[in-house]
Image: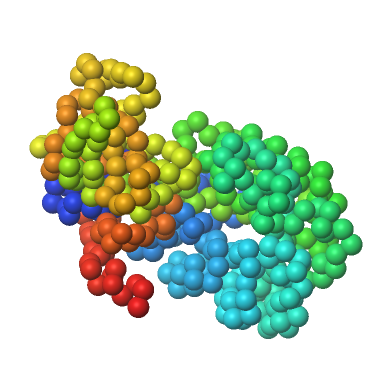
Amino acid sequence: MQGDQGLTWRSWRILLSEVFVISIAALKRNTAILRQLKEEAGCGLVLALKGFSCWKAFEYIRDDLDGCCASGLWEAKLAHEEFGKKVLTYSPAYNESDVAQLCEFTDQLDFNSLGQWQRHCEFVMAHPRFKSGELHCGLRINPECSTGSTPIYDPCVPGSRLGITADQLKGADLTGISGLHFHTLCEQNSDALATTLNAVEEKFGDLLRSESITYLNLGGGHWVTKPDYDRARLVQLVKDTKERYGVDCWLEPGEAIAIHTGVLRSTVMDVFESAGHRVAVLDVSATAHMPDVIEMPYRPDVFLVAEDGVGEPAVCFKGETYHLASEGEGVVHRLGGPTCLAGDVMGDYAFSRELVPGDTLVFDDMAHYTMVKTTTFNGVKHPAIALQHEDGSIEVLREFGYEDFRDRLA
C-alpha cells in the first residue's frame, strides 16, 4: 500500500490515535490521469464534492480539473469560494432562497423534476446571469436503465425520486432548458456507461439532437482511476456522444478522484471472546466514520502497524479458516466500533497474531464517502484530519474536541 498511495508508514507514529490521513501525492496521481482523459475526450471534468470535499486539498488538484459539481447550496458555495472554477449544481429539490443564491455564481443549475423547474423558471430566466448566458439550466433525466447490483445506489429503480423519465417529458414546455443530466453508475467500468448511453439514445435522442440542448452531463460513478478501467473506451464514448448530438459533455467523478488516497488510523481498545468469535473493539466506528462499510457494503483493506512503523496487511476473513501467504494460519478477529449499534462492525479479518489493546490498525481507502458522512453518534470522538505532503511530512488540518460535539446541536 505504501508504494501505491505515497503514504509513509513511519511518519504515522507521531499522529493522534483517530485520524484521517490524505496523501497529496496519491490525489495528484489520480487527477493527472483524469486530466489526460478529459483532454483526450475533449470534455469537462469536475470534482464531485459529495464524495470528497476536504477543501484544504483543493490547491493541489485545482489545475487538473475544471471545477466542482455540487449537490446543493452549501457544496456549491464551497466550490465557488475555495475551488474557484466552474460550479455545476444539481439537487433533488431547491427552495426559493437556494435558487436565488445559486443564480449569483453557479454555472449550471440542473433540476430534478418538471415541477421544480416550473416553480423556479420565471425567477431564473429573469436573472441577469441567465440572460447574459453565464448561467445555464438543465434537467436530470432517468433513462430507466439499471446496470448496478446494489439497489440503494440505483437511481433507476421503479419509483425512483431521482430524474425525469421520457414519458414525463412528453409535451413539456422546455423553454430555458439547455442541458440534460443523468447519473446512473456506481463504481462501474465503461461498459455500463455504453449500456446507459444506448438507453439515453432510445429515450431522449430526439431531444438531445434539438438545437436547444447544448450540454450533456454524464454524471459520476465512473471508476476511471482503477487499474482495470477501460479509459480508451470512455474517451471514445464521450467523443461519439459529442459528435452524435453536437453537445458539450461533462463528467463528475468523486470516487475516482479520491480513491486510494487516504486512510483512517485507529487503535484497538479491547479484545475478547463472544460465542466463538474473537472481537476487537476499536476507537473508530463503521456507522460514524465509514458508513459505506455498512450501507454498500464493502470491506476495506486493513493493516496492522508494527513497532517500526511498517504496515502488515490483514486479510478479510471469508471462510472457516484463512491462511496468510507468509505467516501460516491467521488469527481471525471481528473488528467493531465503540457505539451502541449492534451492527457497528467493519468485518472479520485474519492477522498474523492475536491483537492486543494498544495495537494500531489502519483502514485503507478512507478518503471518499467517509469524511463527508461522519457523525458524532454516541458522542464518539471524531477523527482528526491530516494531509501527508509529497515530502512525507504530516500536516494536521483539524482536531475535534468535546466542544464540537456539544455545539453541533445547540
Height in image: 234 above or below 331? below
- In-front residue for pair 17/389: 17
Judge left or right: residue 139 versus residue 224.
right
Farthest-out residue, left: 307
- The residue lying toward the viewer, choosing from 210 and 320, is 320
Residue 187: tell me if it is visible: yes
Q: Is residue 308 above or below residue 131?
A: above
Query: In the picture, which quadrant includes the C terminus?
Result: bottom left
Q: Position of residue 49 (x, y in %)?
A: 48, 59
Q: Is 193 left, or right, of 73 in this rendering?
A: right
Figure check: 39 above or below 1: below
Q: Residue at x 31, y 18 (%)?
A: 321
| Res 389 seen here | no
Give the total of numbered labels. 0
**Residue 58 position (above or below residue 230):** below
Which x, y percent locates residue 206? 85, 51
Q: Which of the 4 image quarters holds residue 346?
A: top left
Between 319 and 196, the one lying in front of the other is 319
Q: Residue lying farthest front?
A: 275
- Residue 103 screen position, x and y as percent: 62, 77
Where does the image place residue 139, in percent across and percent down from the top left? 72, 62
Point out the image quarter for the N terminus.
Answer: top left
